[in-house]
Image (cartoon, rainbow, N blue to C red):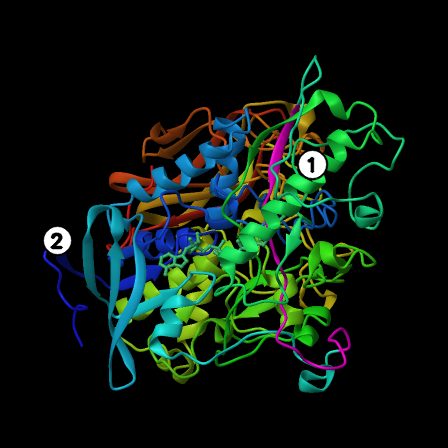
Amino acid sequence: MSFPPSSSTIRRSTFRCDVLIAGGGPAGVPCALAAARAGAKVILVHDRAVLGGNASSEIRMHIVGADCHGKRGVELAVEAREGGIIEEIRLEQTVHNPQRSATMLDLTLYDLCRNEPNLTLLLNTCVDGVEMSEGKITKAFATRAMTEEAFEITARIFVDCTGDGRLGAEAGADCQRGREGREDFGEPLAQAEGDKHSLGSSLLFQARKHDTPMPFVPPKWARKISAADVANKRLHFQPGEQAEDLDYGFWWLEWGGHLDTIADNEQIRDEVAAILFGVWDHIKNSGLYPGAEFWALEWFGFLPGKRESRRFLGRTILTGHDVLESRPQTDAIAYGGWYVDTHPPKGVDSPEEPPCVQHWVDRLFDIPLGCCVSRNIPNLMFAGRNLSATHIAFASTRVMATCAIVGEAIGITAAHAVQRGIGLAELWDNPSEIPAIQQKILREDGYLIGIAHTDPADLAKTATVTASSEQPESPATNILSGFTRSVHGKGGAPADRVVPGTHRWMSDPAKGLPAWIQLDWEKPVSFSEIRMIFDTGLHRELTLSMSEKTTAKMCWGRPQPETVRDYRIEARDETGRWHLVAEGTDNYRRLVVHRLSSPVTTQRLRVVVEKTNGAPEARILEIRVENSSPHEICRT
Ligand SMILES: Cc1cc2nc3c(=O)[nH]c(=O)nc-3n(C[C@H](O)[C@H](O)[C@H](O)COP(=O)(O)OP(=O)(O)OC[C@H]3O[C@@H](n4cnc5c(N)ncnc54)[C@H](O)[C@@H]3O)c2cc1C
């Protein structure tokens, strides 16, 4: 097979890469960045003008994850917020987007991709076909209508992060749709009989309160909505009560899960728009809600946020048992923790039902690599809402921060397979491959339940650690504990797989700053890279949200107070003099990587913390001292 029939205006380009990723949503962007940063040549093909999928300014869902809007969080006991690239994105947003502009998130994602030398970004480009050879994908075809171009992209590994699973579907990857029956997997939360229904799609809006009344005339086709239609939904106020909290629309303006959410998307958009303007008309013009006259629509979406469509079948199918019982997975590459969050497929057309039922998940749970590797296409992986899970398990894994850490892990895995020159199936054949991938995930500030950092390349592991001061629960030696977060409290990781502790050095606040932490080796060591993980308050919720109420619970618009702000890294020479090796000012990041211009040889290295972003003590979770891998891209 080659390009579709030629037409005179279409220009054709050919690309070659290691990893092709289709879909630049919450899963696809971290996947592409992770693979590129790990040294693979990556092409990210995204069919919209802006990245971010359901989180983009086109749709505006806020990114949530395992911390359940911070509900799990207990300082120094349960830190469930995701690390790695999604944390990098969240921290960029809180510092550089205090105004909470939705398009600033688009910019951050675009900027991160544009700055990545190993990553080629094809925007406004839709993957619409594949070439297969001996059961494998050899090429993907893509088209960009607005520039009248067609692309033929050869890659070794293909990753479907399209949400709808278009790339995999073109390749004939096994997939499923709908909701399983209870008998299928013995899931207590599954419905008695399976069906083809899914969660529905929604349009969000943003409204603003004005000083003077703002009229609203609904379009002719808006639905007529009564108080009874929305009595069981989450309107924030009852008839007679003041209209408030309308700044972030209603995610439950949902419909169409009883239809085909791919094929019927246009019909679903039209109907959800009729619902949106009908509900707004009801709020504004029914006379039931005092103060509604001052609210006016500021923005509304035209692109339905799609919750569910295809789910691929991988080597493993994650089930409700895995989620609710936190079953250990030997090939864990990420974790989840959001509720099993199911919705009535007909959405607002099920007025007797609440818009969602959220079953609490007691503990964080493993997400295995097997859920992200196709069971019948050997070089196809997937991440995001289309991963291999039952409807019940998907109802938890589908949230965007979970999609992001799975995406990042798949990017790392793809780059690993490319560098090792092996196929995806071989990852399970050699017992050292999956532990090696898990160590790479931890190195990028990922978290895997019960798995410690044991990478022998880290020279810090062989050092003696001391500090200017420390707290009894958080001694200097904690930076070598192998873990970079606390998860031992209620709602954290399963008790039989957790190592309790703060897993960070905390200096004594009574001694003030500066405070230092020092690594001593018996013999001189040489290194060219220092990586540190600082505390960014992972017990708290942190996410760009259009909702005032949600944002009010966060430290938004500034760096997190626990984070080290100004620091120096110094090495001591044989004469006892300290030399500056690297430094950081105005830091707000959690993972900080210093690649040195030339290797340093020393027996003694220290990090001097001059200032934090608010905390009275210095906090560092991990210091790694390494020789840079030739594959890696410098970050500072
Ligand atoms: C209304 C709504 C409310 C939600 N609420 C929340 C919430 O509050 N918090 C939360 O975390 N999650 C929420 N979710 C769930 C979450 O948004 C999704 O599960 C998540 O976005 C899935 O991420 P993804 O990257 O797999 O897919 P998507 O976000 O769907 O992104 C996939 C991207 O791939 C692109 N694409 C598709 N086909 C192609 C192709 N052929 N070629 C190239 N590109 C393609 C699409 O344009 C899209 O941008 C909600 C979802 C919806 C719809």
Tell me if residue 191 comes above or below residue 12 in the rendering. Answer: below
Image-quadrant location for residue 250: top right
Report x, y in % for residue 617.
63, 29
Q: Which residue is mark 2?
A: 9
The furthest residue to the top:
211
Q: Is residue 277 left or right of residue 237?
A: left
- Give the camera-side residue of 83 and 194: 194
Say which residue label 1 marks: 280
Seen in the image, is 585 located left or right of residue 245?
left
Q: Residue at x 73, y 75 (%)?
A: 190
Mark 2 lies on a secondary structure that is: loop
User: Which residue ends up furthest to the front in the rendered image?
Assistant: 220
Three-letter residue code for mark 2: Thr
- Residue at the (67%, 48%) spot, across then down: 253
Q: Quadrant for the C terminus, please.
A: top left
Instruction: Say what amino acid the circle numbered 1 marks.
Output: Trp
